[in-house]
Structure formats: C-alpha cells, structure tokens
Image (cartoon, coloured by chain):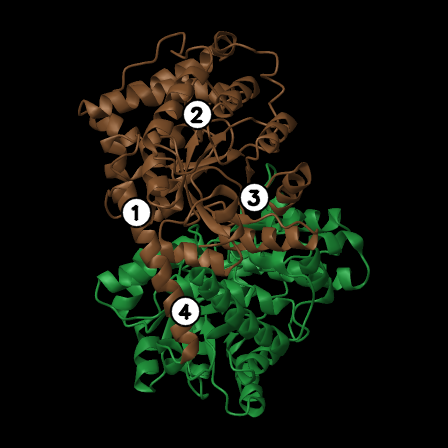
Chain colours: A green, B brown
Amino acid sequence: MNNAVSRMVGCEFPLFAFSHCRDVVVAVSKAGGFGVLGAAAFSPEEFERELAWIDEHIDGAPYGVDVLVPETVDPRVLALSTNAARAAAISPEHKAFTSNLLNSYGVPPVGEDMGVPEGAGITPEIGLALMEVAFRHPIRMIANALGIAPASMIEEAHKRGIPVGALVGAKEHALRQAAAGVDIIVAQGGEAGGHCGEVATIVLVPEVVRALKSAGYETPVLAAGGIMTGSQMAGMMAMGAQGAWCGSVWLATTEAETSETFRDKMVAARSRDTVRSKARTGKPARQLKTGWHEAWEGPDSPGTLPMPLMGLVSEPSFRQIEKAAAGGNQGARDLVSYFVGQGVGLVEQVRSARAVVQEFREEFAEAAGNLVAMIGD
Amino acid sequence: MNNAVSRMVGCEFPLFAFSHCRDVVVAVSKAGGFGVLGAAAFSPEEFERELAWIDEHIDGAPYGVDVLVPETVDPRVLALSTNAARAAAISPEHKAFTSNLLNSYGVPPVGEDMGVPEGAGITPEIGLALMEVAFRHPIRMIANALGIAPASMIEEAHKRGIPVGALVGAKEHALRQAAAGVDIIVAQGGEAGGHCGEVATIVLVPEVVRALKSAGYETPVLAAGGIMTGSQMAGMMAMGAQGAWCGSVWLATTEAETSETFRDKMVAARSRDTVRSKARTGKPARQLKTGWHEAWEGPDSPGTLPMPLMGLVSEPSFRQIEKAAAGGNQGARDLVSYFVGQGVGLVEQVRSARAVVQEFREEFAEAAGNLVAMIGD
C-alpha cells in the first residue's frame, strides 16, 4: 500500500503493532506490518539488549520504538529523583491499603522497599535515557505517548531522518504536536488500552484529520483505539486515517509477554469489562477491570497516587498477583489485569502475531470490496 | 443501495435520521434517506398531529417512528401512575436544589406543580399509547430505544408487515432483541447523544454483527454513535453495518427543533464538551455538558432521580432556561443543553437536512473510492 505513512516508515501494510514484546515486533515487521517496541517496562540496559536482539532477528525489516517521556510531572513528585526516594514517599496508609487488598485475595504482600530497582519507571530522565539507546539502532520511527515529545527527541530524530510519532487524544493536542514538528500523529480514542482520553476513535480521527488539514499541515494520521480486525482498519482508513496503530490485539498472541492467565481472561472478557482508571500508573489508562480497580476507586480507598508513584505501588503488586495466579491461587487470578482496550470483546482465541497480520490484510481487502459492491447495487 | 436494510424499509440510501422534528423526517426521506420521528416529547394527541402532517408532506417516501417504552421501571416510581403523583413525590430538597441552581444563573424558578401536563413523559403506558397512534399511519419501521420492545409492539408490527427496530448498547442485548423477534438492530456506541451504553461504536458494531451471525440470526445492524459524515458511514459499513442511524447531526440543521442558542453552542462545541449523565432523564444519556450537570453531579447535589421523575425536574427547568437564554440572559445561555453525541465536535455550520443527506452520499462514494485506490497502489 503506497500511502504517505507506509513510505515514511518503509512498511508494506500500515498496520502498526505497539508491543512490549520483541518477538511481536519482529513477527509483525517481517509479515509486512510495522512493529513498535514500547520501552516503558525496560531499564536503558535492558532496552539496549532488546533492540540488539531485534536487529539480529528482523531480517532488515523496518521497526520503531515508543518511549514515554511525560510532558508534565505532578508537582508532588518533582523533587523526588530516585525510586528509593519515591518509594519512601508512599504513605504508610497507601502501603497498608495495598497489603490489605492483596491479603484479602490471598496474595503475599510486597516488601517494604516496594521491590523497585533504580533506573526504571515512567520519568522524564529515564524516558530520555531510553531515547538515547534507541538512536543507536536502525529504527524507522520514534514515538512518544505522554504529551509533546521533547525538542531533543525531535531534533535528534530529524537529524537521522527518522520520523517522529506522537499519540494524542484530542485535536488541540494534535495541532500542538504538528507545530512542534511531529511527523505522524496517532489519534487514539478513549476505547484504547493504556493511557487514553475520552473521545471515541470514530470521532477523534476525522476531527484530527480535519483540524490538521485546516491548519495547513500534511501530517498523516494513524487511527488507534478499539481496532482488532482488518475491516475496522479499512473502516478507519475510509474515515481519513492512513493506517492503524494497535496494541491490545497483540496481547492475545502466542509471542506476547502476557501471562497465560491474562490471555485466558482476554478470550473470556466482554467489551464492557475494561475500565479507564488511574489505579495502575497514576494517569487515566484503560485496563481489564478487576477487584484492584474496584478497591482503589471504592469508598475506602486512600486515593490513587500521581505518576510515577502509583506505578511503584501497582507494578510490584501485579508481579505478586501474577506469580500467585500462575501457582493456582484463584483470588490472585481474579485480580490479574493489564492494559487492554474495549476491543478485548472481539478476541476469540490466541493466535500467532504473523497470523494476525495476515488476517488483517485479508479482512481489509474483503471490507473494501464489500463497500464497493454495495455502492454498485 | 440495494442491501437488506434498504429493502426492508424501502429507502434508497440507508441513512436513518432520528429526529423529534417532523420537518427533518420529511426532508431526509424525500432526499433518499429514512426519517424516524422520535415520539418521546409528544403526548399521543400531539403525536397524531405530527404524523398526519408528515403523511401530507412526505410525497409517499418511507419513514418510521421511535417510541420509548422502558423495559424496566425503577421500583421507587412503579406505584406513581400520574404526573401529578410523580411531581408530588419529588422531595422538597430536590425542588429547592433545582430552584437554587436556576437562581444562581439568573433563571426564574419553575412552579410548584413542575408545569408537567398529564399524558406526557417517558412511561410504559404513554409509550404504548404512542405506539397505537403510530400504527394508524403508513410507517415503514417502528423502533424502541429502552430495552426489549413489548411483545404487543412486535406482534402488531409484524401483522402489518412493519419491521421492528431496537437500539442496543451491548451484544447481549442484541441477542435478546433478536430472540424476541426484532428485525433491525441499531448498535449504538457510548459516544452517541441520548441514552447510551459505554462501549464505543467501532467495537460494538463488529461485536454485535459477529454475535448475531454466530447465533444464526440474519438480523441487519445499523451503526449509531458519533456518525456525522458520509465517510464515517462508509467506514462503519466496511466494519459490517448495513447503514447508519444518526441523531445529533440533524440538531444542527435549519429545520431542527433546537433553539438558535443551542445550534450556536453546537457549532462552537468540541468533542470533549459532552457528558454521559443521569441528570436529565434519570438514565445515563449523553448531552452537552453545562453547569446543570456539574451541579447535579457535584458534592452538594441531592442526587439524580430515577426515570421519569428526573425528567419532571429537568424538562420544565430547561424550558425556563431556553426562554431566558432567548431573552438574552447570559447565565441561562451557559446552562442551555440538549442530548448530543461526541460528534458535535465535527459540526462546523448549520445546514439544511437535505444538504446533509446530499453531502453524506457524496462523502460515502468518495470514501469508498479512496479506500479502493489505496489498495490498488
């Protein structure tokens, strides 16, 4: 498919696969799509190892990275520059609430130090360190998902001829990104997994496309949020998108980093089983709804914490939860959750990432053909 | 366009226009779409007059009606069978809160009897009376928007060869409707104006299409929620819908029942300016967000009331608000609101309903053409 986005990043079929799993990135890019490795879960050293592995296995196919450099940081955490200082700043009330919550589901507590190593977490300094790692590899796109990309990211990328992408949830943000020099806008609707706004994909995408055009930008737009099939991708491209950016669909692949427990829960889940909640990262992010969210948003909650403190509470807890669930603990299984969009209701089985790309391509062609046939009548 | 839905209702182009305004219904049907008159705002006598007017002006083009027969009624209001009894059941606290709210924006208060005539409101008995009126006219579809249509509606309609439609916000509801004998499912996403669920249109429509097919039903599905353009309609049809059901787009037409104040606010509004709230009808409905919703959902609110009590509070208040706004009261203008979806962010001007249909047809053809051209590359 010879459109602007495909040309910019060098892929055949503009299906972008956002994944924290290198195997998914490699499988998608080799199948003609475009894999994007999410950096947020890695330390810079780990990220370097992942990218080196990708370079070795991807057979020269194009791929990209997504780093999280938060544009705004809550003033309550600005002064806390190490994870030790951040962990120490979590109140005894929040720690006790977490322990009691885990305990009420039969999950062993997290240690007093919250088990978080230095050099990891969603902070501006770690985001920038991850970015520097990325630039040492032959990436074909670098994206930022939490506000305007820092000027240094845009400058460095452009110096190397790498397009910069940015995720937005509102048209005003798209205009700010385009003004800052971003090359590809990912318009992500409120049905998406992970950090998202409130406007639905089918409204946001045409709104962003129109706003960019009116302001004189030629920046192409990828549609994100709720897309799990090639016919949805075709539909969003009929509405003006140049491609699709998908995250949740890869979580139910055989290659994914997700646990078997979570993949089973994805297959069973309905579209109504997700929630947009601050209870995992501190910013609103859509995820599979479990007792974790009910508790943190319930009447007895001490309140969620700002990013990155909330992650220092939730991530060690979810590691404990997953471990206990894998050991057969049913209470832990109930709590298992991860970032996933409403499209989870369309997941019926776990497949390989390659098979997903292939099916997208077939469904896309079929949907376009059906539409034309309908007009013909 | 010769698809199942167009054949069922006898229209050329499967763009369904839900409107409370007879002029919109007539203009859309005459332009090749399918107008559907919403009955909820009328008494049975008024509804009879509206339908007679439509029959006289529509030149034999097909049209339908939408009545609201709530499937479930809150137990708190089951025993209250007249509007006088219902108005009397509204607590002094709720009345005082309403008066204070209006007063703080400089809007004159509503009288003690709430100004609601008998024989109007969203109740099962009025819904059934409106249905009987509809069957005396040459309607080509009857739809119900609040749960399973009563058996009498389905029986009567089928006896007369009239397809029955039903609005649903979840796939389980679609399956229940199909099992009850409903002929056309309107899958309405959470971005829609008016009563809606939480699942977004691009997830809900494929989910409903797939669920019906898996269960062996051939019931066609219309996509609703957020659709304001022909390219969105084409996109949703690429995803498996057989047509589009739109409401909000007609509110910004010259024929609409909306006030000039509200139409101006629609043009100015962004997609983020709506809210899904119980503060107008008592059930979650999306509408333009104003101080009314902030107050009823704020910390000092006595809480919203169940349907139809909430409407007895809100409708007389909004009549006062509109009157004051039309008289130049800025505070009243700020409060003006109506049911509208997130697609309001795509409204740039007020046009005639006929022009809207024409533009949908052109955009539809263009979108389909673009999609095919993209594959060709």
Q: Nearer the viewer, mark 2 or mark 3?
A: 3
Q: Nearer the viewer, residue B32 or B295?
A: B32
- Image mark for residue B356: 1
Q: Residue furthest front?
A: B60
For the residue marked with disc 1, what is the amino acid? Val
Secondary structure beneath label 4: helix
Q: Are marks 1 and 3 in contact (CB under 8 Å)?
A: no
Secondary structure beneath label 2: loop
Instruction: Write down the residue under mark 4.
Output: B371
Residue B321: image quadrant is top left
User: Real-space Cα distance between discs 2 and 4?
Assistant: 52 Å
Residue B19: image quadrant is top left
Taking B377 as reference, is B304 left or right?
right
Residue B87 in percent (x, y) is at 47, 11
Q: Earlier in the sequence, mark 1 or mark 3?
A: 3
User: Real-space Cα distance between discs 2 and 3?
Assistant: 40 Å
Residue A170 visible from this viewpoint = no
Query: Which residue shows up at 25% across the image and 21% down it?
Result: B323
Q: Earlier in the sequence, mark 4 or mark 3?
A: 3
* Chain letter belonging to callout 4: B
For the residue marked with disc 3, what is the amino acid? Ile
Q: Quadrant of the C terminus of chain A?
A: bottom left
Instruction: Write down the residue under mark 2.
Output: B300
